Structures are given as C-alpha cells and as structure tokens.
C-alpha cells in the first residue's frame, strides 16, 4: 500500500485504541521514522499529512533536512546521540528523544542557542541491549537539569522488548507513564514533562492505551527500503 493508505489504517487503529482508553485521538502524534527510506518516500509521508519525521543518525537527518526543508517537517532525533554529533544536528531538530546522561546534557547546553525540547530516555525493559537510564536515576537527573537553561524536559521515552507478550510490553509503557507523573510532581521550571514517546509499528496500540502522546512508526507506515530493523 502507499503511505496515505498506510496512514489511514494506522490512524484507524489509534482511534480505536483511544476509544478503549477513553482518550481523544488528537492527543496522539505520529512520528514517521524515515531512517530506512529515501527522501522521496519521506516526502510521501509529508504529502499524506504527516508533520513529524524521525531520524536516528546525524547523516540521515542532515541529508533529508536539506532536501525537505521547503516541506516544513518537524524533525525528531530518535536515536542514540553521541556528544560529538550534537553540534551537527542541534540547529536542525525540534525534539531530541535520547537524553540519557549529563555529558550529553552538557553538550546540548553548550551548543544550543535556545531552549531545546528533550525526552529523557528510560530503559524500562532492563534489557542490556537498550540505551536509557534506569528508572531510579531519572528523578535525580531531572533535578540536576534545573540548572540547564537550554534544556526543556518535555517528556520521557522508552522502547519495549520485541515480544508477543502483551503483558510485558504493557508493563514497560505503564512504568514510563507512572514515572512521567512523578517527574511532573517536581513542578520544575524546565521540566513540564507532559509527553510520552513510546510505541512502534509492532506495539503502538498498546502504547496509546497506556498514554503515549508520540508514537514512532517506520515499517508499517513508510516501509523499509534497505532491509533495516524494527521501528
């Protein structure tokens, strides 16, 4: 199917998940993960009505940013961000989804000319293969960021295990939502923390039921032209 048909099917599933959870579909934004597709395919997503595009490598983001700048996408950096790559991408993204250490916060603070919207990445699955902070590290980390005027913590991000066990997936997302609520109780000036970035092609409906406000969808929306991995 083309991107427009894929988007319609995905939006229907989001609408159904919102209905089950007593939420409004307007609370959920779709990020088209374009890391495995061409700029032309990314443009198809924009033409279909997608506003948010996500890339996990600086080279892919910068290449597509240049080619699609007249189309006006909102860019999300969703991959692991090396400190040495911050300078290259900082002026080209609206959101960073992978803030998980003070050294990275230091570099964002240094390089950003204005406040940057960031998600703290949390490893709720406890998988050693995944990046992100342990849950117990998040509140102390956010408190330290009160001194970083160029960083705004808009929410938390996680990835669930790639499994058919719905209970395991749901638990990871629920933990993130509960942790998000704890961060909000801090009432910190630069940490409104109202957003939840969670859910991909295989589990986004569960994520929506558990409170996701951004879902990151690649293969089931724009496809996979290079044979890359899950998104």
Image (tube, grey):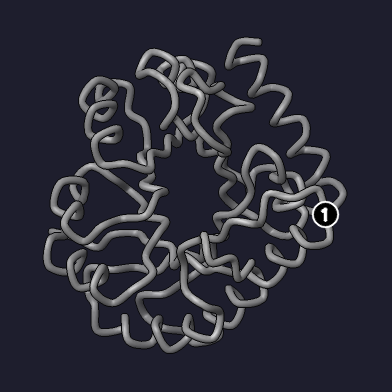
Q: How many marks?
A: 1
Q: Residue furthest right?
A: 20
Q: Is residue 188 above or below residue 121?
A: below
Coordinates of residue 81 in the picture (x, y in percent): 31, 55
In x, y percent, where is residue 224? 52, 23
165 lies left or right of 126? right
Quick check: 9 left or right of 33? right
Where is residue 182 shown, x and y percent of the image?
59, 83
Number of residues whose C-alpha sits closer than 10 Å to that of mark 1, classed few (under 14), some (14–19) or many (20 or more): few
Residue in the image at 23% along x and 73% along y: 103
The residue at the far front in this view is: 128
* Residue found at x 43% / y 62%: 119
The residue carrying mark 1 is: 166
Quadrant holding the N terminus: top right
Nearest the viewer among 188 and 202 is 202
Q: Residue at x 20, y 51 (%)?
A: 90
Horizontal placement of 147 versus 3: left or right? left
Identify the element where label 1 is drawn.
Answer: helix
> Does 2 appear above or below 182?
above
Quadrant containing the C terminus in the rendered view: top right
**Is 74 located above or below residue 172 in the figure?**
above
For the point 37% across and 55% down, the residue is 80
Picture coordinates of residue 160, whole percent (x, y): 65, 57
* Residue toward you, 33 or 116: 33
């Amino acid at each position: 199917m083309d991107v427009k048909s894929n988007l319609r099917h995905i939006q229907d599933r989001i609408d159904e998940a919102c209905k089950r959870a007593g939420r409004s579909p307007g609370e959920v934004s779709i990020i088209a993960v374009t890391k495995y597709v061409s700029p032309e395919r990314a443009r198809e997503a924009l033409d279909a009505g997608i506003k948010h595009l996500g890339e996990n490598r600086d080279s892919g983001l910068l290449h597509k940013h240049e080619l699609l700048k007249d189309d006006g996408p909102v860019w999300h950096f969703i991959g692991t961000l090396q400190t040495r790559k911050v300078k290259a991408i900082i002026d080209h993204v609206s959101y960073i989804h992978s803030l998980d250490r003070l050294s990275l916060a230091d570099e964002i603070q240094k390089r950003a000319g204005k406040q940057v919207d960031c998600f703290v990445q949390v490893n709720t699955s406890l998988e050693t293969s995944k990046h992100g902070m342990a849950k117990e590290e998040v509140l102390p980390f956010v408190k330290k960021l009160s001194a970083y005027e160029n960083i705004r913590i808009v929410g938390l991000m996680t990835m669930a295990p790639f499994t058919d066990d719905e209970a395991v997936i749901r638990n990871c997302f629920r933990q993130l939502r509960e942790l998000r609520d704890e961060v909000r109780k801090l009432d910190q000036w630069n940490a409104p923390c109202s957003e939840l970035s969670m859910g991909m092609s295989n589990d986004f409906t569960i994520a929506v039921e558990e409170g996701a406000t951004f879902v990151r969808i690649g293969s089931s929306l724009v496809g996979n032209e290079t044979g890359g991995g899950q998104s």
